[in-house]
Amino acid sequence: MCAHSVVLASLCFAPALSAQVPETMDQGPLPAGSGERPYLKAREGLQMAFSTGLRFPMGDASGALGDTLAARYSFQLPLVFDIGSKVTPNVHVGGYAGFAIGAEGNADSVEEYCDDDDGDLANDISCSVYAYKAGLQAQYHLAPSAAYNPWLGYGAGVELVSQSLNDSTRHFEERTLSTAVTLGKFDLGVDFRSRSGMGLGLFSEASVGRFVHSRTEINGDTTYVGKVVDPAWHVWLGAGVRLVLFP
């Protein structure tokens, strides 16, 4: 009877002892040859990331015939900074801000104009594309305490795309600034989490938006400013790598 009482008391007391051990405690190294990584603590609080890669245009810049996004802009090389907080081990909320360098699109008129083929070895014509974006986002991390942590993200914000054509021989310069609303930025990625407080990951992204405002200047004079008359949907598809602080 006494032995049975001891056993019952032990069974009742064991969960209480387990409850006093923090779930995020570092369990130390595993036995050699186990083939598993040491336990990684799931983080909360501040998290930052820097990402880069390539992105490509799809869809239409406006409803005008032949005005596709690819006709205006080609691929872009972005650099994006994310900052926010892991409000829970799984949920991250915060913002993003980015800058991208790109190339002119495949429209015949633009390609012909930007082709500096006069043979004088001087850079008489320059064409450039720069993009800026910012917004808010949220991420859901599927395995916040694992070595490899897959995650999903959604964001929304604004984007400015500036395209400049400069012909120093003809003393001609044209600049167009287009403002777009990003209604959906969908991300999918996976981060490798180290014990040093840093991580490295891969991601893919699809940003869905439409241009709502445009401004054109020729030789410093504004020739058009106003809303896009016939807005249309476009998509930027991209992928790349990211460096994560406090993953």
Image: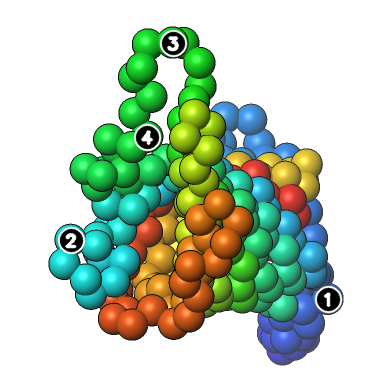
- Quadrant assignment, res 43: bottom right
The residue carrying mark 4 is 114
Viewer-proximal residue, 203 or 67? 67
Give whichever of discs 3 and 4 has the lower sequence position. Answer: 4
What kind of colouring is applied to the model shown? rainbow
Q: What residue appears at the point 48 percent right and 67 percent down from the top-left corner? A: 223
Asked if residue 148 can be seen in this view, the reply is no
* On screen, residue 235 above or below 131: below
Between label 3 and label 1, give the one nearer the viewer. Answer: 3
Residue that mark 3 sits on? 120
Neighbor class of circle 2 (other Cα within 10 Å; few <14, some 14-19, many 20+) is few
Whether residue 195 is visible, yes or no, is yes
Disc with the residue nearer the chain's start (1 vs 4): 1
Quick one: SS at disc 2?
loop
Separation of disc 2 and disc 4 at Cα? 19 Å
| SS state under label 4 | helix
Mark 2 → mark 1, Cα distance in angstroms: 67 Å
Q: Please name the amino acid that badge 3 sits on.
A: Asp
Q: Label 4 is placed on what type of residue?
A: Cys
Q: Residue 238: horizontal and vertical position, in percent?
A: 40, 51
User: On screen, 202 above or below 143?
Assistant: above
Q: Secondary structure at mark 1?
A: loop
The residue carrying pointer 3 sits among few (fewer than 14), some (14 to 19) or many (20 or more) residues within 10 Å by Cα, namely few
**Amino acid type assigned to the residue bearing label 2 in the image:** Gly
**Who comes first in sequence, dot 2 or dot 1?**
1
* Residue underneath mark 2: 66
